[in-house]
Every structure is written in C-alpha cells, then in structure tokens.
Image: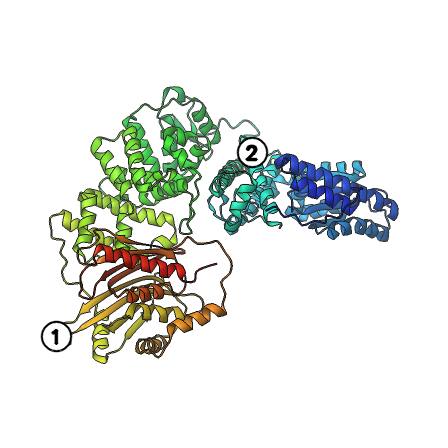
Amino acid sequence: MTSVDVSTESCDDDSEPGGYAAARLRLLTEKGQSGPPRRAALAELTDDWLAALFAGAAEEAGVAGASLVAVGGYGRGELSPRSDLDLLLLHDGRADPGALALLADRIWYPVWDLGLALDHSVRTPAQARKTAGEDLKVQLGLLDARHVAGDLAMTSALRTAVLADWRNLAPKRLPELDELCRERAQRQGELQYLLEGDLKEARGGLRDATALRAVAASWLADAPREGLAEARRRLLDVRDALHLCTGRATDRLALQEQDAVAAELELLDADVMLRQVSESARVISYAGDVTWREVGRVLRARSARPRLSRLFGGGRTGAPERTPLAEGVVEQDGEVVLALTARPEKDPVLALRAAAAAAQAGLPISLHAVRRLAATAKPLPTPWPAEAREQLVTLLGAGESTVPVWEALEAEGLVTRLLPDWERVRCRPQRNAVHTWTVDRHLVETAVRAAHLTRRVHRPDLLLVAALLHDIGKGWPGDHSVVGETIARDVAARIGFDAADVAVIATLVRHHLLLIETATRRDLDDPATVRSVAEAVGSTGTLELLHALTEADALATGPAAWSSWRGSLVADLAARASAVLAGKTADPEPAAITAEQERLAVEARRTGGPVLALRARADGSDEQEPLGVELLVAVPDQPGVLPVTAGVLALHRLTVRAAELRALELPDPVGGSVLLLDWRVAAEYGSLPQAARLRADLVRALDGSLDIESRLAEREAAYPRRRGAQAPPPRVTVAPSASRHATVIEVRAQDVPGLLHRIGHALETARVRVRSAHVSTLGSNAVDAFYVTDAEGAALAPEVAAEVAGQLESALGAAPGPG
C-alpha cells in the first residue's frame, strides 16, 4: 500500500507549503507516472517551490549576491519519494550575518515543517571549495551541483571551480574514493548476492554508480557505459517503490517489504524483482572493477613517466611489454589481452583459451578483449573439440581467480553463449538463509572449492564440471536434482564427454545431496542406509567424486552448511558405502563407542540417573566449531528421555544445532541398556551453563518435579516474539524403505526454542519408541529424522506410520512459532 508522509492541506498556491505538499502527494500517487519521469517531475516541483521560497525570503531579508544550489541526488534531479533535500545556500560574503540567518530560516523551516529530511549548509564559494578539499563526501556532492534560484553566475562559477579542483586533485582523491568504496563494500556486502541488501550502500548499489560518475568527471578514466544507465535506473525505481510502500526513507530491501515492492513495480513476484536488483548490481560492480583497474593503470603510468623521462632524456620509451600466455593470448600492463595476430572469428576456442590463461595467471581479462571476443568469436561446434573442453576444465580448476574472469565473460554474454542453460540460473536468488550466493555464483563458487579437492579424485575434470552444473536444475520447476540430471546429461554431451563420462556427471548431479542428507538424517548403523547409497552411486570412482562434490557444495553454500562434524559423518558414510561397493557386507559390526561415552554410560547405569559432560570439542583441538560445543548425556533407558532432555536445554537457552540418540547395551558385569545422546549446542546469548546445573534440572525433569511445559510457556509469555516474515508450515513425512528395522519419520520446520522438546513429546504421546534421532539445523530450518518402532521394537505398519506423522505435523502446526 502506498504511504506518503506529507501534509495534505489544500492550497491553490504551490509556492506555499500546503500547495507544494498537495501537488507532491498527487504526483506520488498517480499510477500513470513512475520511474525517471516522476523523479524529474518531483525535482522540478521542488525546484519551483524552493525558488519561490528563496525569492520571498531574499526580499524580506534584503540579501543580494546569494543563490540556492541543489547538490547530491537532488542536484542530479533524482528525487525518490522520501529522499533528503541536499541544499547549499551560497553567498558572496557581503550580507549581514543576521540577514543571512533570516534568509536561511525562511527556506529551511518550511522544509522541516513538511517533515522532509534536509541536509543543508551556508557557505561562500571559497568556503565551499575549502570544505570540499577537506571532505571527500562534500566534494562528491558538489560535483552534481545544480542551480535552483538566485545568482546563476555565482552557482556556475562554483561548479566550474569545483570541477577544476576535482580534476587537478584526481591523482590524490581517486585512490581515497576507491578506498572509501572498498570499506563500504566490506561493511555492507555485495548487493547482487544479498537477500536483504542496501540499495544505496552495498557494493554494486547507487553509491558505487555515483562514484563512477565522479571518476568520469575527473577525465582520468571512464566506466563502460553499456547497460550502466539502465542498471542505475532500475535500482532507483526499486528504491522509489520501497519508499512508497514503507513511507520511510529506507534503502534496505527487507524481506517483509519485497512482495509489496514487486507489486508496486507491477512485477510478477518478489523473485523477479530481486533478480533485476541482482542483475543491476552486477553491471555496476563489474563496471567498477574495470574502471578502478583503469584508474590504477593510468596513475601508475603517470607516476612512472617522470622517472622514465629522466632515464631516457624525455624520448619515447617504446611499446608496452607483451608477454605470451597462450596461443593468441598475451599479458600487457597487468591484464590479459589478445595477441596482435589473434583472429577470434576463425578460432572458436580462443574465448575459453584466453579465460583459462587469465585465471591460471591470476590476472583480469581486459574489457577490450572480452568485448572483441563477444563481438567476433566464432561459435563452438557441437560437440566441442577436445581443446575447448580442456580449457573449460582449466578455467574451473584455477581456484579463486576463476571468479573475476567468469564474471567478465558473464558481463558480455559469453557464458550463456557457451552454456545456454546458464540463463535460467543467472542472478537467480535463493530464499534460504543458509545460502550466501545467488544460484549462478554458487555454482562457480562450488567449482572454486572443488578445485582445492582435485588431488583427492582420479577424474578432476568430471568433478569440476559436475560442480559447475550440480544446481543447474534450479532454473526449472520441479526437483532441481531430477531436472538437473537431464540438463547436465545434455550439457556434458555437448561439451564433448563420452557416454560413460556423461553418465557419471549426470549421476553426480542427480545425487549431489545424497551423502550429506543421508549422513545427517539417517542411521549409518542400519544396513539399508548404506546399501541404498551404494546402489544409487554405482561405483567406487563415482562415490569418490560424489564425496568431493558434497564437500565443495557445502563449503560454497555458507558456514552453516559444513563443519568438521558433518564432514566426519559424510566421510564415515562414504567409507561404508565404498566397502559395500567393494563387495563387503553392509551389516554393521557392534557400534564402537569412545572411552568417554563408555565411562558416562557405566556411570549412568551404576547411579541410576543422568550423567553428562560438556566440552568444546571431542578431539581436544582448538579449531572453531560452528555447530557449537559437544554435550554428551547418558541416561538409563526409560520413556521420555528425548523430550525431557531437549526441554531442559531449551530452558537453559541452549540452541540445538545437531543431535544423535542411540541405545547402548552394556556388557556384563554392568549390563543393561543406556540411552546415549550426543548433542551439539550453542548458547542463544551469554556463556554456556554449568554442567552441574544442567544435570540437576535434568534429574528434576525426569522425576517429574520440574514442569518443563509450564516453564517454557512462562518464558514464551514474558518475551513475545517480534513480528517478522511468516515461516512456511512444518512438514512431517514418512521416508519409504529407509530402514528394515524401524520407521523413519522426517520433520522439516522452522527452528524455534523448544522445537525438539515438542517433537519428542508428540512422539511419546503417539506411543512410539525413538530408537535413534538425527537432528540438524540449517540456518533457520530444522531438518530432523527419527527412527521409531512400536513397543515391541518393530517397524510401524504403513497406516500407523502415516497416522503418527499426521499427529506430529498437527502438534507442530499448533505449537507457537515466529510471528
């Protein structure tokens, strides 16, 4: 809903505040006008109002030799609905200070009275230039100075002087501006990848676009213009819609506002809007990379010229040095360019060869070279020649230096020309807090991670290509792994792999989530678990590649997706599946327990009560564990252990990141059954509780003297949740054929305090026994699997399992969640 916070007082004269406010409101609520025309019309309307204010105030104050100047965004005529008005009251220094103050008050106060934000200053031209010389941000604002009212000659003279100062000081100020942009990017992140980015401050946002204008004004370098104006316009349009929807001067595109902003822009949905933002930010970021590289080159050349002149007596120093890198590709002045003899129109592999050479050398590929390749390169035949395939693999295997080269190819459309299916994932957002990148950048990042794992596999080429393609199905409806398998099969054949290699790549894409999901959600001691993985993968060679791809994919996703704990689970599963593929039995040996686990289990059996140990890491290393610390709990086998323990942890404000539960049969002479729970927990805030306090509350909860339900409800009432994005409802399913000895119930829900307690309580109410539990948290999502049996220890009948799943889903749906 459009919200504009200005006065609607009616007045026939637009020079009065009420008249301006009414005209402004009409302009902002007219559906037929938006984008650049509305911004320009709003600036013109504001100019007319301020000019009238200035004329009346100057006459009243008796001030001559003054002018009103718009600077910054207002100076550019780009007023969004809630933009600040950046104004400079310029004077020649001859007016009485009291009269000058009266003039300023008669202009500033009407602006404030309307609730408009105002950034103002009063200076002489000399003061303005001096302040600009001391403050880079002031100087940048003055570069867009525009006359509004008063002495035009004074404004024009200031503009001319400020531009001259900027050009004279460019060798000093441009590096400062570059550093300012880098610091801001470090703080705000990259707009093209953020789900809730700042349209103005993030890298690739409106401030970067303004910085590029400043570079162009220096005459030292210029940004690539193609697409830049359109990208800037799109970001401004989105900001306009954001201001209208929120009624606030905000530039952060919060999740809860995105649907309304997309509707205001008349787009299909928020994802379409986010994709446009990403594409625009990518254009601006790439233009910035090219421009700042050119600035550095020019400044280095200027710095070197006096020294060379002294050495060579002012004579010419000859052509720049060119170092060959590959056939038709050379290095010149820190960039990769095409050789003088290169003929892209006759060499279809040249684009990939140049990209691979640049990435291997850790150098950027020049804008001129990429554009020439895009304009003249001959298309590759189908299937690709062997050299083209090898160059693609070389490019992907270069590691971190692959990214800027890939982005250069992407900016000029070469990637989608080589891989047409790429267009479907390009700039596609991922609405999952676990993911750091858009889909396309995630694919490249996965290849970067895979490049560090190529020594672990026998076919690094298949690993790298599968990494690039593993999520290619996300651009289409349906299960992206299933869809991606078909696309990957087609792409791999087009690239020139033989039928056997195509089948391996397709298998890797189809099952790229198999190891991580199985390892964290299934009982690895169940023979059916390991056998199903072995059957899906088919060979030890493919399993080796899948193991490396799994790690690369998780590392490229974000910090919440991988840890040493998850890595050890995946490695254990891969080793077991490899043994099955080698012909060994999948039947497990008795599960080994650590000395610490055995000590706790024996102690729990001896005392008849819970025993626990809380420590930073099980292996004693100092490595930071993103999943939290380890909590081991041993309890004599009895009903209700899972929900009670989970409830105690929730009371102590411990977030469960991962958990496993299993029953241990202790040998004689101790004997008996003990439940062992291995948790990874982290404090919501503050420090971890003492183990003694946890044990005391656990004892009370097990004997019934601590009412967990009431305590959790009291805390819920005392700390109401903040309003935020509505989470999707929980989903509970029965995994078919996942185990021969138990029924596997999967739960996917929003991770909230006490969730595991509610799940355990609901399963106890359903009168099923939890044989083992495998709990994992990915960002704000809990993904849990519970192996349950009936009272006799047998798997549930299908109809009973479906009923239990339905009861659990209903219980979770009725439970409190984020508002």
Q: Which one is in front, 5 or 431?
A: 5
On screen, 3 above or below 663? Answer: above
Residue kind at label 1, given as amino acid type: Asp
Tag 2 secondary structure: helix
- Residue that numbered label 2 is attached to: 230
Point 84% across, 46% down: residue: 57
Q: Nearer the viewer, residue 255 or 220?
A: 255
**Mark pair 2, 1: CA separation:** 77 Å
Residue at 40% of width from left, 20% of height from top?
345
Residue 230 picture quarter:
top right
Secondary structure found at label 1? loop
For residue 750, side relative to residue 156 (left or right): left
Residue 765 x/y as whole percent: 30, 66
Between 492 and 490, the one lying in front of the other is 490
Q: Which image quadrant for residue 156?
A: top right
Mark with earlier residue (2, 1): 2
Asked if one can make out residue 751 in the rendered structure from this viewpoint, the answer is: no
- Where residue 753 sits: x, y (%)? 41, 64
Give the answer, above or below, for where 307 lies relative to 89.
above
Name the residue carrying label 1: 668
Query: How many numbered marks appear?
Result: 2
Q: Identify residue type, mark 2.
A: Glu
**Could you tell me residue 308's position as x and y percent?**
54, 33
